[in-house]
Structure formats: structure tokens, C-alpha cells
């Protein structure tokens, strides 16, 4: 069997990762996989991934949510191991959106242990990249600017709700008051325009409940750019509801484009939602691009 390491984020899903840990250990140990490593603090994924790769790991099982998966995938790519290591994802986060693009039974721990132990098939998937001020930021599922980033900042304040209800509640709280933002694209005319939200999607879902880019595919070599334009007041409410089923794309204030790369300029260095993690960009000028077939993922 290929050398396999299981990386678990106990803090994922507001402690769901920790609660699942006994089941994860038991399921994988039943197939001779007992190298389970836990993150101890935010950003610990890169260290664990690098240690596993140095130890000769050929398969990395990532137990967490979109943020954990994205950070681990980014560490694999930073290490130049995208062609060498295969990944498998087990859900324990809030939205767990990237796994919805795959056929693997990511919500079933025992089924995933069986799949990893067999590890007979794989699928090449793309990754997204943001280049800003000399820094490279990877994402697996989505990178969002504007309303998305503001809502994510609010969700980090905690509360009694769990799952994707946290995101929905925070979004509703900001829906009418968010002023929007200005940016300039890198097109032929480079016009500046006001938008409510700008999302670059590798996958089709985000926020746990929203089909933000229903036509997006994780293996097509491009990113889907969804811009929700200058929509104001109560007109935002039905648009918000339509986004839950992917029907917002037909709205006259919504623009959908597909490309391998996008050049953007903001009025200042923006904050960005990278796979559910709020990241401050280093520059107002950004390049967002697709890294085609960057990762190997185990599938049934």
C-alpha cells in the first residue's frame, strides 16, 4: 500500500474535526493506515504536509473543510509535489464545498477509508492562484472579493449557529447595508466599475448553500468569474435567494465570464475569501489565474 498520512484539523467546523477524530482513527486503522497527524494552530497545515512529504507520503488524506483542504493543497503545490502526492478529502468543516465537485463519498469516513486503501483511480483537478505583491495564494474552490469577504469577516466573530447557517445569517445581516466596491479589470478598455461581489470559482458552490457558479468545473482549465454588479436596497433580497439555486446568473446585473487568467486593480489592497479563509492581499493589483490539472485526487 502507498505510504499514507492522515492530516486532521480538530478545529474545523467549530470542533467537528475533534469530535470525528476517534471515528477517523478507527476507520483508517482498520485498513492499516495509522499515521494520523493533527494541526495545533492556524496555518499548521503547511508544516504537516511538508513533514509528510519528506517522510515519503504518497497519499495525503485531509480531514477538515474548505480552508483546511485549500491550505494543504497549496502546501503540496508550493513543495512541487502536485504530480507526486495524491489527495483525498474527508468533510468536517462548515460548508465543505469543494468536495461537492467530486464523486468521492467525502461525508462517509468509513467509505473514504475503503476508497483510500484501494486508491485505484484518480482525477486531475485544477487549482486557483492569486498573485499579489510578490505573494502567491492558492485556492481550491473559490476566491471572493467584496460582499463575500465582509460576510466571512462577520462569521469569524462566532455565535450560536452552526454549519452554513452561520454564513447565511451573516449575509442577511449585511445584505442591505454593504456599499459595494470599485475595481478595474484588465480588459481592452479597463473601465472602472462598482460591484457588490466578485467571485472566481474553480468549483460550483460556496458558502455551504449557494451555487455561485453553476457551470464551473474543477477540471476544465479555466476559472468562472461571477460579478454581481451595482444592485442596491431590497433588490438584493430576491437575488440572494436566487443564488442558492444558481438562478442568479440570468439576472441583468450579474455577469459570468470564463478564462484562464484575470488582471484586476482595486482602490486599495483588498481582503479576499480564499476557500473560507479571510486573507489580506499585499497589493491593489492582482492576477487571478487557473493552474490546470495541478492536483491528483483519489476518486471511486
Image (cartoon, rainbow, N blue to C red):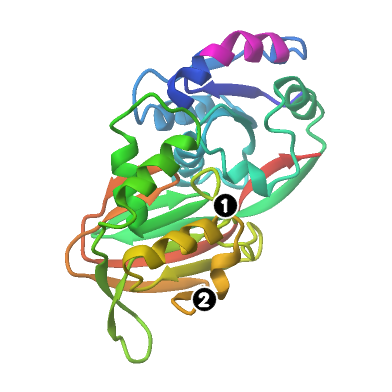
Q: Give the residue at x 61% y 8%.
A: 22
Q: Which residue position is annotated with label 1?
A: 205
Q: Of the residues under marks 1 and 2, which one precedes in the sequence?
A: 1
- Structural crowding at the residue carrying mark 2, measured as other residues with C-alpha within 10 Å and reported as few (<14), some (14–19) or many (≥20): few
Q: Which residues are magenta?
A: 19-27
Q: Which is nearer the eye, 270 or 178? A: 178
Q: Main secondary structure of the magenta part?
A: helix
Establish if 136 lies above or below 256. Answer: above
Q: Where does residue 177 sit, x and y in percent of width and height?
A: 25, 57
**Image position of 221 (left or right of 300):** left
Q: Position of residue 258 (x, y in %)?
A: 54, 74
Label tally = 2
Quarter of the image where one finds residue 155: top left
Query: Is residue 202 shown left or right of residue 196?
Result: right
Query: Measured from the top left, where is residue 91 in percent x and y?
Result: 60, 30
In-front residue for pair 172/114 = 172
For numbered disc 1, what is the local secondary structure? loop
Residue 294 to residue 290: above or below: above
Please report contact status of discs 1 and 2: CB closer than 8 Å, yes or no: no
Amino acid at each position: 500500500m502507498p505510504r499514507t498520512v492522515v492530516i486532521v484539523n480538530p478545529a474545523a467546523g467549530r470542533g467537528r474535526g475533534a469530535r470525528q477524530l476517534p471515528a477517523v482513527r478507527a476507520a483508517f486503522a482498520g485498513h492499516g493506515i495509522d499515521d494520523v497527524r493533527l494541526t495545533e494552530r492556524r496555518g499548521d497545515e503547511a508544516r504537516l504536509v511538508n513533514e509528510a512529504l519528506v517522510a515519503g507520503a504518497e497519499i495525503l488524506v485531509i480531514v477538515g473543510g474548505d480552508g483546511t483542504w485549500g491550505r494543504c493543497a497549496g502546501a503540496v503545490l508550493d513543495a512541487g509535489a502536485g504530480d507526486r502526492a495524491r489527495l483525498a478529502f474527508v468533510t468536517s468543516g462548515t460548508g465543505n464545498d469543494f468536495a461537492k465537485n467530486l464523486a468521492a463519498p467525502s461525508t462517509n469516513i468509513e467509505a473514504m477509508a475503503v476508497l483510500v486503501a484501494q486508491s485505484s483511480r484518480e482525477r486531475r483537478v485544477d487549482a486557483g492562484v492569486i498573485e499579489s505583491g510578490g505573494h502567491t495564494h492558492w485556492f481550491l474552490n473559490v476566491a471572493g472579493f467584496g460582499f463575500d469577504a465582509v460576510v466571512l469577516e462577520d462569521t469569524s466573530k462566532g455565535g450560536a449557529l452552526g454549519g452554513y447557517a452561520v454564513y447565511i445569517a451573516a449575509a442577511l445581516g449585511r445584505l442591505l447595508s454593504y456599499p459595494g466596491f470599485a475595481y478595474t479589470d484588465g480588459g481592452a478598455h479597463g473601465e472602472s466599475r462598482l460591484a457588490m461581489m466578485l467571485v472566481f470559482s474553480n468549483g460550483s458552490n460556496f458558502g455551504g448553500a449557494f451555487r455561485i457558479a453553476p457551470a464551473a468545473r474543477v477540471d476544465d482549465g479555466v476559472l468562472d468569474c461571477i460579478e454581481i454588479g451595482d444592485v442596491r436596497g431590497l433588490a438584493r433580497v430576491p437575488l440572494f435567494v436566487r443564488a442558492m439555486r444558481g438562478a442568479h446568473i440570468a439576472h441583468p446585473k450579474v455577469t459570468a465570464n470564463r478564462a484562464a487568467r484575470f488582471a484586476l486593480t482595486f482602490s486599495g489592497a483588498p481582503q479576499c475569501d480564499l476557500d473560507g479563509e479571510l486573507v489580506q492581499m499585499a497589493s491593489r493589483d492582482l492576477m487571478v489565474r487557473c493552474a490546470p490539472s495541478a492536483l491528483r485526487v483519489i476518486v471511486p
